[in-house]
Amino acid sequence: MDKFGIHSGKAAPLRRSNVDTDQIIPAEFLKRITRTGFADGLFHAWRTDPLFFINHEDHSDATVLIAGPDFGTGSSREHAVWALQDHGIRVVVSSRFADIFRSNAGKNGLLPALVDQDVVEHLWKLVEEVPGIEVEVDLHNQEIRAGDYAADFHVDDHVRFRMLHGLDDIDITMEHNAAIEEYEASRPDFLPTTM
Amino acid sequence: MAATMAEKVWNAHVISEPGEGQPDLLYIDLHLIHEVTSPQAFEAMRLSGRRVRRPDLTLATEDHNVPTTDIDKPIADETSRLQLDALRTNCAEFGVPIYSLGNDEQGIVHVVGPQLGLTQPGMTVVCGDSHTSTHGAFGALAFGIGTSEVEHVLATQTLHLKPFRTMSITVEGERPAGVTAKDVILAIIARIGTGGGQGHVIEYRGSVIESLSMEERMTVCNMSIEAGARAGMIAPDNVTFDYLKGRDHAPVGEEWNEAVAYWSSLRTDDGAQFDTEVTIDASELTPFVTWGTNPGQGAPLGNSVPSPEDFETEAEQQAARNALEYMGLTAGQPIRDIEVDTVFVGSCTNGRIEDLREVAQVLEERSVADSVRMLIVPGSVRVKRQAEEEGLDRVFVKAGAQWREAGCSMCLAMNPDKLAPKERAASTSNRNFEGRQGPGGRTHLVSPAVAAATAVAGRLAAPADLEVRN
Ligand code: SF4
């Protein structure tokens, strides 16, 4: 995983609440068996709308997505995160994320930046009024900046730590291998096995 | 200190507590796998030269992509075939047991685990699938995970997690006649909303919940995720133990007694505190259906389609307007007047033997309306065999329904069973999102009983309506 410190890029407004993972990447696009190549399916149903951010000259190359509340609800598909990343999105800003989406995003290095809804409203206005404005997302200080505007965001400490250091989860866990073995030895015999 | 059931199960699986602000490291007792969310996990394992730590706590089955007709023929869709092939190759390479298409134990992952007795009280169960919450019906802590977590569990049999908050939903009173488990959970979601359970594990309690059969409990827990919760749980009791006894992977002899003693200790202690508590009076319950495009947009079958103005917040009003437009409905139209093109019975919510019995009871001596196509899809090969042994398949076919092979089928648009644009379905599945059952398709979530009555009437109906109109 790449280290994430301060990211600057254009932002795109997604003025919708409850954007579920079926909207982010419909099931018909899930059949790939690799982690890349999902960008074409991203927001598939909305892509035909000429005003949708992907088709908008100021927002098509945005790397920061400003979304309405309850982003990423529904199915646990991690493809939603890969599709956003494949399109170039590095940060999603919202006032509420579905839990699984938030955890999937953090694990893949897509920053789920949690803010109050009035910050979302403010950023929406800003990026619509100032075309192509540069947004800076600072993970060290947990701050989003755009022009004169600055707002704090929240991210889980654990996710922040790993993203700042670009660490792989499995390596971190295997440092506890002795404890895992000890736990395994103490599991009751009545527990089932699949074989 | 008094603890909730979820806290007890959690605590029994903590390997180490890495300290303030850091998540716990939790041991996973059972890891279920299907073809959609696992290939990239195995790909990453292979790239980093890792092995599956506990293949004996891992089980794969094929469900999302499998066709439900002509399963002896090669799979027509190339990408579907690719995913199934990848799962088979990966399982062979990493030594993971698999129930492939054609095997007697194949079926939807959340039907297969419980019917084999692999899902037991007090266990931690995960799968790269949000409806893993189904397994909580046994008093297991069961939740969906993403593909990176699938990889993590394959490699380490553990997960880093922060404790979930706890929520109790108590459904107290006597369940009115004609109200099914599906109606109970749809009413709960309509009450607390699709974000109402967010961050929580829900414990369903109260006399109505206790009166449910094991399969009905699975229907309720299955849809916990539709209320935004990570998991749903129901305390194990004699209903649970009776269901498990004698199943393939259930303990036997002295181990059975030990297990039952442990399972019985899992109930939430008197005086334990939940972070959130909700109470529902059973007398308010009635057959419930969805009219919108998320599972929280539901209403009693006897109501009319709501108007956006009925909702308080601007966001809800907008969501209702979008939903009505997508669904092709008009505010104020009686829900019972909504005509459907297709009826789908199946999925991990309602594809079990009791669901099929309920449908057969309604279809007996009746026929599916000419304007309706009805698909009945068993959740597993075992369910299929059992239904055929009981002669249910003959009732279905005689009534004019299609009797299919086991799989996820029309629950999601990943296999040949799909809705056409604007086609309207009454579906016993769990998600009515835009395009979920096929691009442009319109879904009304219903119970098996309502699905069957709807198939006969050609419009949304409950079995009681058929008697009145006959
Ligand atoms: S039946 Fe539907 S909800 Fe259940 S596992 Fe299959 S696709 Fe998912």
Image (cartoon, coloured by chain):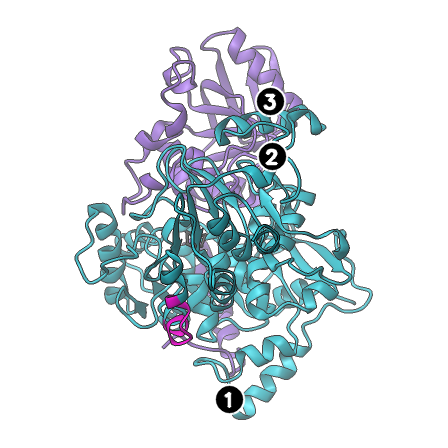
Chain colours: A purple, B cyan
Q: Label 1's element?
A: loop
Front residue of B113 and B318: B318
Circle 1 is placed at which residue position? B252
How far across and how far down the image is residue B65, in percent? 31, 52
Quickly name the residue at label 2. A96
Quadrant in the picture for residue B121: bottom right
Image coordinates for residue B338, horizontal then vertical, percent: 53, 38
Read off the magenta span.
B385-394
Image point 75% across, 63% down: which residue?
B174
Q: Which residue is drawn at 40% across and 62% down?
A: B396
Tag 3 near tag 2, CB within 8 Å = no
Asked if A2 appears above or below B109 in the picture, the reply is above
Is the residue indicated by label 2 positioned so its CB lies within 8 Å of ligand 1? no
Separation of residues labelled 2 and 1 (CA atoms): 47 Å
Q: What residue type is labelled 1?
A: Val
* Amino acid type indicated by mark 2: Arg
The mark closer to the camera, 2 or 1, is 1
